Image (cartoon, grey):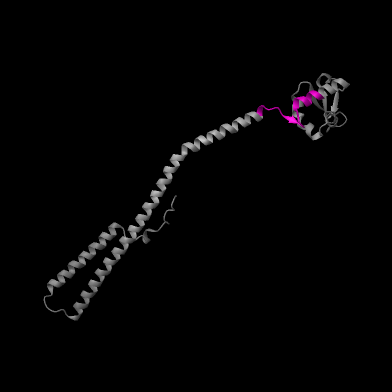
């Protein structure tokens, strides 16, 4: 639908401006006047030098007129091309104006849908191996209480819950926030962490 604008051209390649054409036409009129004066002044036959000068003058005038016509035709074509390109640009602008409200409405719908999905993800309970985080933590607490465990290494806790140690480490932030547990370092191995029941913190 849109048309490419004509390639940029230097002013020197666009031909004479209206002021330049007027100046050129004035020169032609001046030559015409000189020619008329020459004709009036010579009632008799011209000598060869005068005749040659007259021929050259007429040739210059004719060539000037032809050049003016060519430049006028060329500039008219350039103006028409620019006008057509401008018309296409204006049509594109109108099309954009027509489509803009619909695009804005579509963007708003997309944003609303994304926010709705994010809200669902934020409120949905996290799961590990198909069970919610809460069920895993509750299961660990219940097992430790039932068998009388005060603390367990992460590896043992993973076996109790039947999940990998890596999966259990995903629960570490939740265990740290749960008031029933506390994460402590082993006294025998400083790099080893233990999950201890808070009620046995001093034990």
- Residue furthest to the left: 43
Residue 127 lies in the magenta stretch:
yes
The x and y percentages for residue 181 are 79, 23
| Residue at the far top in the pictured view | 199
Q: Residue at x 60, y 33 (%)?
A: 114
**Could you say which is closer to the camera, residue 31 or residue 144?**
144
Q: Is residue 110 left or right of residue 45?
A: right
Q: Which of 113 and 66 is in front in this view?
A: 113
> Could you say which is closer to the camera, residue 184 or residue 177?
177
Is residue 111 rendered to the left or right of residue 170?
A: left
Q: Position of residue 73 (x, y in %)?
A: 32, 61
Q: Quadrant of residue 42?
A: bottom left
Check residue 129 for magenta coloring. Answer: yes
- Asked if 37 appears above or below 153 in the picture, the reply is below
Q: Is residue 203 visible?
A: no
> The C terminus lies in which quarter of the figure?
top right
Residue 59 visible in the current orientation: yes
Left or right of residue 62, residue 185 in this image: right
| Magenta segment boundaries in residue numbering | 122-139
In the rendered view, tell whether residue 27 sits above or below residue 203.
below
Q: Where is residue 14 in the image (x, y as percent from the top left)?
A: 36, 60
Which residue lies at the image location 25% right of the left edge and 72% below the top edge? 59
Relative horizontal placement of residue 15, taking residue 177 as reference (left or right):
left
Name the residue: 22% across, 75% down.
Answer: 55
Q: Residue at x 18, y 69 (%)?
A: 34
């Amino acid at each position: 639908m849109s048309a490419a604008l004509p390639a940029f051209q230097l002013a020197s390649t666009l031909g004479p401006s209206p002021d330049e054409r007027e100046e050129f036409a004035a020169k032609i009129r001046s030559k015409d006047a000189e020619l008329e004066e020459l004709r009036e002044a010579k009632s008799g036959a011209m000598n060869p030098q005068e005749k040659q000068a007259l021929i050259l003058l007429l040739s210059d005038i004719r060539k000037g007129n032809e050049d003016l016509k060519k430049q006028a035709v060329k500039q008219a074509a350039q103006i028409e091309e620019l006008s057509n390109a401008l018309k296409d640009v204006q049509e594109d602008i109108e099309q954009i104006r027509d489509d803009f409200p619909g695009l804005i409405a579509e963007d708003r719908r997309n944003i609303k849908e994304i926010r709705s999905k994010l809200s669902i993800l934020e409120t949905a309970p996290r799961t590990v191996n198909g069970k919610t985080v809460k069920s895993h933590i509750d299961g660990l607490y219940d097992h430790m209480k039932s068998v009388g465990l005060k603390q367990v290494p992460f590896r043992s806790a993973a076996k109790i819950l039947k999940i990998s140690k890596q999966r259990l480490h995903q629960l570490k932030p939740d265990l740290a926030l749960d008031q029933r547990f506390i994460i402590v370092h082993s006294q025998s191995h400083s790099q080893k962490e233990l999950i201890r029941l808070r009620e046995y913190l001093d034990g």
